Image (tube, helix red, strand yellow):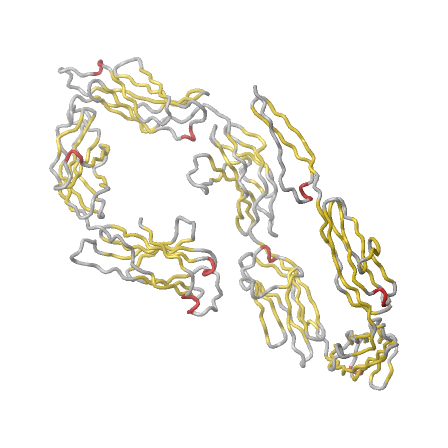
Amino acid sequence: MLASNITLECFALGNTDDVGGYECEAINTKGKDWHKAWVYVESAPEWAETINNTQIDIGSAHSMRCVAMGKPFPFIRWYKDGYMYGKGELKFSSLTFTDSGMYQCIAENFWGIKYANAELRVITCAPTFEFNPVKKQLLGARDGRVVIECKPRAAPRPQFRWMKGKELLFNNSRISILFDGSLEIRNATKNDEGVYTCFAENSKGKANSSGYLTITEATSITVAPEDSEVKVGEEVVLRCAASFDPMLDITFIWAIDFRVIDFDSEWQHYERLWRDDGSGDLRVKNAQIWHEGRYTCTAQTVVDSDVAYADLKVVGRPGPPGVIRVEEIGNTWVKLRWTKGADHNSPILYYTIQTRHYWALNEDDWRNASTSPAFLDGSVERAEVTDIYPWLEYQFRIIATNEHGSGEASIPSLKIKTWDAAPVVSPTNVAGYGGRNGEIVITWTPVEPWHFYGKSFGYIVAFKPHDAYDWWYETISDPETRRYVHRDSYFIPTEEDFQVREFQVKIKSFNVKGDGPYSLTQVIYYPRDVPTEPPTDVYARPVSSTEALVWWLPVVDTGTSLQQYIEGYQVKYWRKYDDPEPGANRIFVPATVNQTRLENMLPDAHYLIEVRAFNGAGLGPPGEHCEMFTKRAPPPEPPRMWRYISWTGKWLYVWWDHIQYDWFGNISFPLYYKVMFRKTGYIYGKVYITGWHFMDFPMPQVGDFELMVRGRYEGGDGPVRKIRIQGKAATMEPSLSLLALVLLALCIVGLQI
């Protein structure tokens, strides 16, 4: 055995998240081996915090800091005006003019170096209100807190004094002069109205500024929202009203879990309800699970605000259960375990387990499974799936149900395969007939693949003459085989043998685990000659330009007459003047049927139709030929042009060109139109029938959809014209103008089917 070298290569690991141990495992049928290595990542410095140009008052405290990230950790050093100045963080307890200058910090490690520059300017000036005077008109709420700012430009920091009119103010239980110079008034009353003046003075000079304070009525919520409950898809209104000063404007701000609601972008679910009585209610529309939370109503004016809270509970169908684990596997059962999903505020009543096996036709071809226990209460988290097929690949999923309905299905489980077992299903529709030269032809319908139950599946065919004692056996190893032919000169009838010979036939299936049961024994017949009577009264009529139906009176079969034993009928059809008879189309039907559909015919053509009875010996004589004309074909093009689509929010209007009929052309006569409306990606949709060349019907609010129109003619369905309505068109606000609606982006596709 040759050993191969396995190399673990790492490229561009520039992120510290890549640090860690890496393990490589090699495995084959002979065994496995593994190797573990540790990966370290280092990097050059990168700034996490740096310095900026700063202008600050003389005598102030100040600090300058640079923070860099890197590995190994960078070393920080400082330069001032090009000279080494210090390390780490720079701190100034009282700035002087000598501290002004150009500062540079440097971060450095083994992998690189990083620079940052900034200027520090220490200034001094007399107080001035030129750039930030006291507001001339000041507002405050009664019984509230009022702060009048006083922020002149001054260096060093000035001393502050406040006056109301001609009264000098001092700190007391209601009034405080703050460190930054602002004046604070607590529990404000109407008596606090008046002119307030701020005086600022330092060693360079002094200045003052004044404003008039007006006390307004306080804003107070009078109707607070209440805790509510709403079902998914329904709506609820949260009330909120407040009293406020009539000279002010009020606004209501709504938030969910302290996130302010954007009514412009979330209009599909949230609507603000304004009223003249000072209220701003919130309507939650088409509520979904994620709309659950704490809702905050803030009644706000330019002076003050008030806040109230309410909790909204959204109830609905449960969420999908958690991950499904297969704990144990048998031949007809599997034990499952899962975790409980979200119940969405309504207790789970029961679970439904669904299965999908390997031979499912579609991705959504799930079936409810039999379980033990039969009823899965909402409290259980494990169950046994029973009555499934052996030796078959399965997936499972689980659906939870509460009083509001069934929720989404869980993620399908991993695929598993049940153990094998002996088959229990035998082939069906066992039949046969005798052919020429001693042939016995035996036919059956094969067993479906999900009934194989194990490897090496096949059939055992048993047959014997009716009057014989011993059976002949033949093994068929191909499970898709439908026919077996046995040749034996013993079965060839002699000239003196004028009786129909009977044979008994039965078939069973087998696999590596054993044999299944035999099918019911069937009797087949060995005739000597072909039928002698033809079918009569053959009649046909066209269905479309390519199809027709044909009927006939069957040959009477007594079951005992040698010549009148019938296996079925051959229907042959060809164009009278354009096709040679030997190349005609042929259809074979069983003796129990006296009609069939003819397909793949050519439009507007003259056909001859012939019907013959047959048995194992061959074909009988033909009946009288039936003549028939197929209908003219539909036009090759769909309705020529779509005009436009307009949407009002509730109805979709569609126009198309009316089909013009040429009485002297070769196109079949139009009957009506078929219109299909379906969601994009879906196979099925709603079909409308109309004789007009326009339609209107309800338009859903969300999603991408397709509209298809085709004409129905005497000769069948015409080609399809398809139009796609993109997702944006289906979710636009109803307030859009008609012109904007006409300009919706449409994808027009002609599709021939």
Q: 667 or 230: which is nearer to us?
A: 667
Q: Quadrant for residue 491, please give it.
A: top left
Q: 87 or 621: which is nearer to us?
A: 87
Residue shown at 56%/44% (left/top)? Answer: 350
Residue shown at 68%/43% (left/top)? Answer: 17
Image check: 363 left or right of 193?
left
562 in relation to 742, above or below: above
Q: Position of residue 105 (x, y in %)?
A: 78, 55
Image check: 399 left or right of 56?
left
Image check: 174 left or right of 409?
right
Image check: 54 left or right of 475?
right
Q: Position of residue 641 (x, y in %)?
A: 31, 60
Q: Position of residue 690 (x, y in %)?
A: 30, 59
- The total number of labels drawn is 0
Q: Quadrant for residue 606, please give it.
A: top left
Q: Say which quadrant the N terminus sits in.
A: top right
Residue shown at 36%/62% (left/top)? Answer: 654
In the image, farthest residue toward the bottom = 166
126 in relation to 418, above or below: below
Q: Position of residue 372 (x, y in %)?
A: 54, 35
